[in-house]
Amino acid sequence: MDSLLFTVIILYILSTAGYLAFLFRQKERLNQAGFFLLFCGFILHTITILYGASLVGHLPVHNLGETLSIAGWAIAGLFALFQFKYNLKVLGVYAAPLSALITVAAALLSTEPVHADKILESYWLIFHIITIFLGDAAFALACGLGIIYLVQERTIKNKNHGFFFKRLPSLQLIDSTGYACVVIGFTMLTIGLFAGFIYAKTVWGRFWSWDPKEVWSGITWLLYAALLHGRASLGWRGRKAAIMAIIGFIVLMFTFFGVNFLLKGHHGVFTQL
């Protein structure tokens, strides 16, 4: 399994190199190579996760290394879907290295597989985790698009038609793609939270227990709900939407990392080192 994950990392790193080369050289074959390598890495990553699940009898999400591996897989897979839909090539410069970095961290933190325990034997848990991580991946891409939007906007305002202006897409395309990412992320997060409520009821006997992870997940949900409401009712597009997407992802990262390391709760069982 370690050799499989190592191969996944190599493919993600080579994909990163391909996308970076495309950014500088603007040769279509470099973009195609970057996407092909990332997609191959995603397929092999999927096999790695399924193989790990077959060894222990449950989805491998018992420690921080395993959950990071799922996160890297989700970002790579969701980016591939968005590439087919929107053909936003420059986003690969953000998605490929992010997947590589997260998967490297997962490999460095990997430990011996934890065999099935009662708390992990639930289809609701699998559904909860997969939808939550797909939502997180969509929010990660929305954050990247927010950064790209701000860079391109600054380039246009400064009338600097240089490196970035020629290589980044239009503000409208960046904004609309970022909005699609937030919509998908919010939908997945909402479904994942409901699945988590049901799972919590079956395991801990209650839907909600004011666990720090639950509280901060609720805060994250409200923040993205505010972003979508502001866009629909108050015209929060462009710069405001980009900034909100970046802030939302920062809050999301605290929910994932900060809560686990700084605050105690029963969700810690899934992210122990």
Image (cartoon, rainbow, N blue to C red):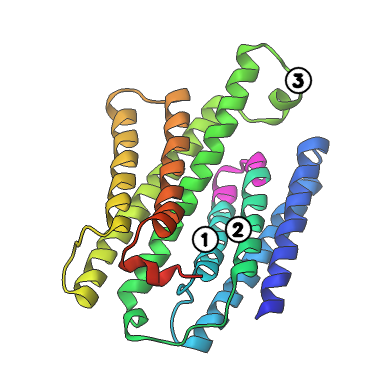
- Place of residue 163 in the rendered image (x, y in percent of width and height, measured from the top left): 76, 25
Residues under labels 1 and 3: Cα distance? Answer: 35 Å
The relative height of residue 243 versus residue 190 in the rendered view (above or below) is: above
Mark 2 and mark 3 lie on one chain; the one further toward the N terminus is 2
Q: Are marks 1 and 3 in contact (CB under 8 Å)?
A: no
Q: Residue at x 47, y 49 (%)?
A: 138
Q: Circle 3 is placed at which residue position? A: 162
Q: Which mark is residue 71?
A: 1
Q: Observer-nearest residue: 27 or 116? A: 116
Tell me the magenta residue range.
82-92
Q: Amino acid at mark 1?
A: Ala
Across and down, in percent, residue 137 comes to 49, 53
Which SS does the magenta portion mostly show?
Answer: helix
Q: Which residue is mark 2?
A: 102
Give the foreground label among 2 and 3: 2
User: Callout 3: few (<14), some (14-19), or many (20+) C-alpha neighbours within 10 Å?
Assistant: few
Residue sitting at 33 percent across and 57 percent down?
213
Judged from the image, the secondary structure of the residue bearing numbered disc 3 is loop
